[in-house]
Image: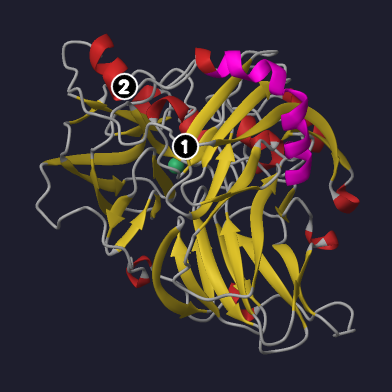
Amino acid sequence: MRERMDRRQFVRTGGRIAAVAMIAPLSACDRALMGRGQDDPALPSHRAPRGPARDIEIVAEPAEVEIGPLGVFRRWTYGGHYPGPEIRLREGERLRARLVNRLPDPTTIHWHGVPVPNEADGVPGVTQEAVRPGDDFVYDFNARPAGSYIYHSHVGLQLDRGLHAPLIVEEATPHVEYDREHTVVIDDLLAGEPEMPDQDGRRGPGMMGRRGMMGRRGMMGMMGDETPDYLAFLINGRPPEDAPVLDVTEGERVRLRLMNPASATHFRVALGGHRMTVTHTDGRPVEPVEVDALEIGMGERYDVVVDANNPGIWTLAARGLGGNPSPARAILRYRGVNRSAPAGLPEGLGSGRLLRLTDLRSVETVGEPARAPDRILDLDLRREMMMQGRWTIGGQTWPDADPLPMSPGERVRVRMTNRSPHPHPMHLHGFFFRVGDALKETVVVPGHMGRIAFDFIADEPGDWFFHCHHLYHMESGMARVFSYI
Ligand code: C2O
Ligand code: CU
């Protein structure tokens, strides 16, 4: 897939220069000259892209995609692939990615987790106008720090049409050794088109017609919170009946980059016959911790290393926490083992040592002295019945929401209380935050009065989106924007 993108790069070289110049990111100096309004803190950007660039083209386009025995689906794709093609970069390498929009609707790309310059962040109406059909847009940034990331559309419900893909930034020197790696993209698949439920939780005729299940379910879907009734859970775009095979050789240490770009499903992940050593969360290295299972919320990533010391054919499974579909599967197959199907699902799906948030200890010392916060924001997460049942952060619903304040250089503490029964994977753009002893940018706030606090240093200019990564919560208002005052 990478070859394919490289090939395209040559085809369009002619038109590239002009367009890049047009949208070149502002330098700190330009910004100071242009001003950003009266309150402009003139905070210099630390992220202006520099160095020779790797130019790629990403075409967003509808495509017919075969999903094993489930049949052919019309997905919205990057380059005809679902999930989209993995992009791999060296740490610090500059990426100039031209998004070409061949979809019927406007679109953007968000580089989930990568601290990009604000103008490359891909949030429609906040950092850019969405790219109209037939238009293009160049995202330009240096890929750092190393880690496992996702790139995806940030417009409407496009994520649930398939517009997501892995972005891997390879470290110069990993803090754990491994011999081989596999990327594991876990997703939820709709039978039809994504739609927002109306006030009664009813979805449009598209889904009713395709499946006829919604009516029976009391209109709200399985979770009673706008989560659609998914047809299947997939790994790397394949259903359990046609699971992808991950090859290993006995004696190897295998790194699995587990990613959850699903629109509305949390998963519990386990591997038969092996424990998993968690080495990274949201791309950031942590002190290795061995577990039988982990839960991964929408937008989260966990890298794990597995000691391939138990030859056979094993199932890596991701069970949706809520929803009917059977667990997504991949097959871990040792070379030279000629048995057919593996035994059932891994025990870790239901029992064993589960990774806890408090297990995660960053191995990085970030430029972040352990000082008291300069500002504390208390934000309730809840659905407001007085506001048509819309999801809110701090009592407000996007886009009719005040900016959340921050000042240049501040250490901002966000304390969230979840006044709903549903877990919310809360994602901050632009910054890693410290939660407990870990660095992350997406953290699940458990339901039923779950409380999570995180701190980040506001040291990069721009307006930065902050939202629930449950797509249907976000689209129903569960988002705010951090702005400098
Ligand atoms: Cu992955 Cu604002 O999102
Ligand atoms: Cu949510």
Q: Position of residue 441 (x, y in %)?
A: 39, 48
Magenta region's main secondary structure?
Answer: helix
Residue that protrudes farthest toward the front in the picture: 52
Quarter holding the N terminus is top right
Observer-nearest residue: 274 or 170? 170
Q: Is mark 1 within 8 Å of ligand 1?
A: no
Q: Position of residue 234 (x, y in %)?
A: 72, 54
Residue 154 figure quarter? top right
Above or below for 468 versus 433 = above
Q: Secondary structure at mark 2?
A: loop
Quarter holding the C terminus is top left
Q: Which residues are magenta?
A: 1-20
Residue identified by numbered label 1: 51
Q: Residue at x 68, y 70 (%)?
A: 316
Q: Amino acid at mark 2?
A: Ala
Q: Amino acid at mark 1?
A: Gly
Q: Is mark 2 within 8 Å of ligand 1?
A: no
Assess disc 2: are there few (<14), some (14-19) or many (≥20) residues with their C-alpha within 10 Å of its C-alpha.
some
Residue identified by numbered label 2: 401
Q: Secondary structure at mark 1?
A: loop
- Number of labels in the image equals 2
N-terminal label among 1 and 2: 1
Above or below for 248 versus 364 = below
Observer-nearest residue: 85 or 320? 85
The numbered mark at residue 89 is: none
- Taking the image as shown, residue 222 lies to the left or right of residue 46, namely right
| Tag nearer the camera, 1 or 2 | 1
Assess disc 1: are there few (<14), some (14-19) or many (≥20) residues with their C-alpha within 10 Å of its C-alpha.
few
Q: Position of residue 25 (x, y in %)?
A: 42, 22
Marks 1 and 2 sit apart, C-alpha to C-alpha, by: 38 Å
